[in-house]
Image (cartoon, grey):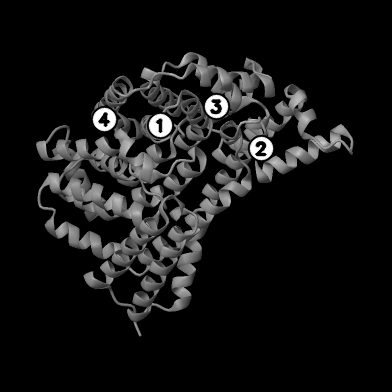
Amino acid sequence: MSEKQPSFLDASIPLIVLVILLSASVYLFGDNSSYGPNQIALFMATAVAVVIGLKNGYRWAVIEKAMVKGISLSLGAVLILLSVGALIGTWMLSGTVPTLIYYGLQLLNPSWFFAASCLLCGIVAMSIGSSWTTAATIGVALIGVAQGLGLSPAITAGAIVSGAYFGDKISPLSETTNLAPAVAGSDLFDHIRHMLWTTVPSFAIALILFTIIGFSTDVTADFDRINEISNVLQQNFSINFTALIPLFVLLTMAVKKVPAFPTVFIGALLGAVWAVLFQQDLMAKLVEQDISYALASLKLIWHIFHAGFTIDTGNASLNDLLSGGGMASMLNTIWLVFCAMMFGATIEKIGLLRKFVQSILFFAKSTGSLITSTIATCFVTNVLTADQYMSIVMPGRMFKEEYERRNLAPVNLSRTLEDGGTITSPLIPWNTCGAYMHSVLQVSPLDYAVYAFFNLINPVLAIIYAYCGIKILRLTPPDSVAKDLAAKA
């Protein structure tokens, strides 16, 4: 039996099943839906897609190979996730995160906190080109500061995600910022300059909204609690600028474009060394006394790498604030990523996504509707394949020819891929980016998504620009002629 193209009904059924199951998962399990129920929903939706593929003549061996390949594409992210788990644990032990929390409590005014957090994450992410590294370092500390100030973790996470993705999006060091123009056929710096027209106004609006929330909400600092946390930090950790050196080393490596996995893992190792060198009083309390100090220290750090850091301060809420990390803490996220990638790879292989795009182009008559369709396709790809890289590459390949046919410059497509793909990925709980942010910040995307103002405003502003014809660049006639000659050659 030969393989045949799916019908629109074929393409719709797995998506409908997935939406129903994920909705039921959230309804039945609430905040715990990402700790197993969502994975089962993705698994069952994959099974439905497999049945449709078999019906259309695809052999099981072909579908299974596609699943394995899809999962393999996420292994780079898995290595980073495991390294981040280790880094959070050792940076707790080394005093790096506690020191950031301590100084943050002293310096950040509650009224400006959300806007300042967004701006700080934006600057750091732009400098290093990584939203993930920003969230795992500055973001974790800011969540701790928010808890110390009695501020909303959900709004704080929204500010962190907004800033991290703004900085990531306009940084020439970012992987996605390089990937989008490569797929669309535009120049990197032309792409960045063209993105500024939608990105900067969106970020400015987000900062204004965070400022309004800060000044309109009762965010009077509880100085008794701040003093309590500060005292606990000083009693349990050696708080000084020396503890921040691992952070500066990691940021320097990121700026130097050292790959993310070795950068983060080296940061974790450096945190372990710093703990031994500068947190000796804390280490003495935590290590076992019946073996030598050197051996006990090695055992403790080994344990923290896999199980994370825990401390007993005598205050349960502060224990939660100052504990976390470990590679084991990332295993649930990895499970979610594997299930999501398996589903995405299956529906791509049997042609379901292609069917959707063909149907969309039939209705996309104007430039505004074409760009809106591209953004929608990027978002749906993020939902279905659970990977921001796929949400750039697949729609980019699918729409590139149509943009050229309509005489639209490649920067229009590359900007739209970022506006619809990169930006929306952390808003989806089972997407690799959403799952990562949940694991690091300990706030569900379902809770922070409504406050990730930059991520929500940017796609909307891009659509408005498209329909109003603002900064929609056309190919010049010579470019069009050159492309026609190249196509005929």
The Cα–Cα distance between marks 2 and 3, rounded to whole angstroms, is: 26 Å
Picture residue at 43% right of the left edge, 45% below the top: 433
Mark 1 burial class by Cα count in 10 Å: few <14, some 14-19, many 20+: some
| Residue kind at label 1, given as amino acid type | Ser
Q: Quadrant of residue 126?
A: top left
- Give the mark nearer the N terminus: 2 vs 3: 3
Mark 2 or mark 1, which is nearer the start of the sequence? 1
Q: Nearer the viewer, mark 4 or mark 3?
A: 4
Compared across the picture, whether 374 is left or right of 108 comes to: left
Mark 1 and mark 2: Cα distance apart in space: 23 Å
First of labels 1, 4 by sequence position: 1
Quadrant position of the N terminus in the picture? bottom left
**Label 2 Cα crowd, 10 Å radius (few <14 / some 14-19 / many 20+):** some
* Lower position in the chain sequence, tag 4 or tag 2: 4
In the rendered image, which quarter is residue 6 located in? bottom left
Q: For this view, does 361 lie left or right of residue 295?
A: left
| Image location (x, y in percent) of residue 329 | 59, 47
- Label 2 belongs to which residue? 310
Which of pointers 4 and 2 indicates the residue nearer the eye?
2
Specify the label residue 433 is tagged with.
none
Looking at the image, tell me whether mark 1 or mark 3 is earlier in sequence order: 1
Mark 1 = which residue? 152
Residue 251 is labelled as 3
Disc 1 from disc 3: Cα separation? 27 Å
